[in-house]
Image (cartoon, helix red, strand yellow):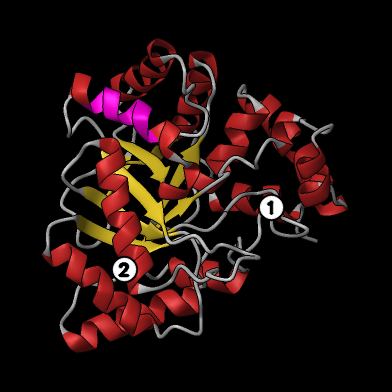
Amino acid sequence: MKYGTVPHFDKQISRLVMGVIPLPQNDNEAAFALLDTYRAAGGNIIDNSYHYGPGFSVVMKAYYEARGEDALIRFDKGSHHHYGRENWNRTTREAMDEEIRGNLERQGVSYSDFYVLHRDNEAVPAGEVVEWLNEHKDAGRIKAFGGSNWSAARIAEANEYAEKHGLQGFSASSPNLSLAMANEPMWTGCSQPTREERAWYATQPVGLFSWSSGGGGFFAYLDQVPDIIRVYHNEVNFARRVRVAQMASEKGVSETQLALAWTLNQPINVFGLIGPRTVEQLEDNLKAVDITLTPEELTWLEDGPVA
């Protein structure tokens, strides 16, 4: 395993982040096997969310009771908008308070290492969000925080406000950074950083925690899945998949490993969220950490030969 650090957090974080969504909710033995295998390989952080529902948190509560509250770093999320509802906006002090406390209660723990806002509402000043998050940090409910699917400009705005006012700023950003370019968001309000934003992240210590970091199943050839067709089927991605297959064969690795390695080798403080459903899939993902790609190889996989 490889590790990195982020601002305002004093622990080393594994570059591969385990997601809760693949964990079976009715089979703790199987769920624990996945989590134990991940930890045995050096993994130490779990991605969860208030909006994934209480079922996954019940599994994690049982795991913490069995393995200890500090068995894993908790990358907990919340503040996901209720699209189509009257109270759709969850970027509020009240919603944040409800969901930070809710994550703790559901998991039976005393704090979250991270609280990451699922969505942004640009009508809310970033400084207000920073103020609210610092209230929870000062109360000991969270240690660090960030935004998922926030633009680089809004992350910068939040951190500029924090620095100016002597407050803790954002430690993490969690958009989708992968070799598979999206035609449209997988879910409402999701984002992929532009090339310009990627260049900005390369200058920042903020950790970029990429969901669907291996391409969301596109490089596993899940071409009958409607969402894969809708989001990832385009000529640019098909050409990238051909190049991935060629390089993977040359390196003696799988295509899914190489696609994940593309994300992990970006010149950014990047961490990759993974969602293996079996121990075998997890072990395949873990091998991606050991693949080193040169800047030229990264560029070739993305853009092809330079004329």
The outermost residue toward the front is 86
Is most of the magenta stretch helix, strand or loop? Answer: helix
Kind of residue at disc 2: Phe
The outermost residue toward the right is 235
Name the disc covering residue 177, or none: none
Q: Which callout, 2 or 1, points at the residue further toward the start of the chain? A: 2
- Helix, strand or loop under label 1: loop
- Helix, strand or loop under label 2: loop
Bounds of the magenta span?
Answer: 57-64
Q: Quadrant of residue 184?
A: bottom right
Position of residue 251 relative to residue 86, above or below, is above
**Residue 106's x, y, as percent?**
31, 39
10 Å neighbourhood of mark 1: few (<14), some, or many (≥20)?
some
Q: CA distance from mark 2 to mark 1?
A: 25 Å
The outermost residue toward the left is 139
x 69%, y 52%: residue: 186
**Residue 171's x, y, as percent?**
30, 63
Q: Quadrant of residue 9?
A: bottom left
Using the image as rendered, state which of residue 162 and residue 48 is in the foreground: 48
- Tell me the residue that label 1 is attached to: 186
Kind of residue at disc 1: Met
**Residue 150's x, y, as percent?**
49, 69
Relative to residue 274, is residue 97 drawn left or right?
Answer: left
- Tell me the residue that label 2 is attached to: 170
Relative to residue 5, is residue 201 drawn left or right?
Answer: right
10 Å neighbourhood of mark 2: few (<14), some, or many (≥20)?
many
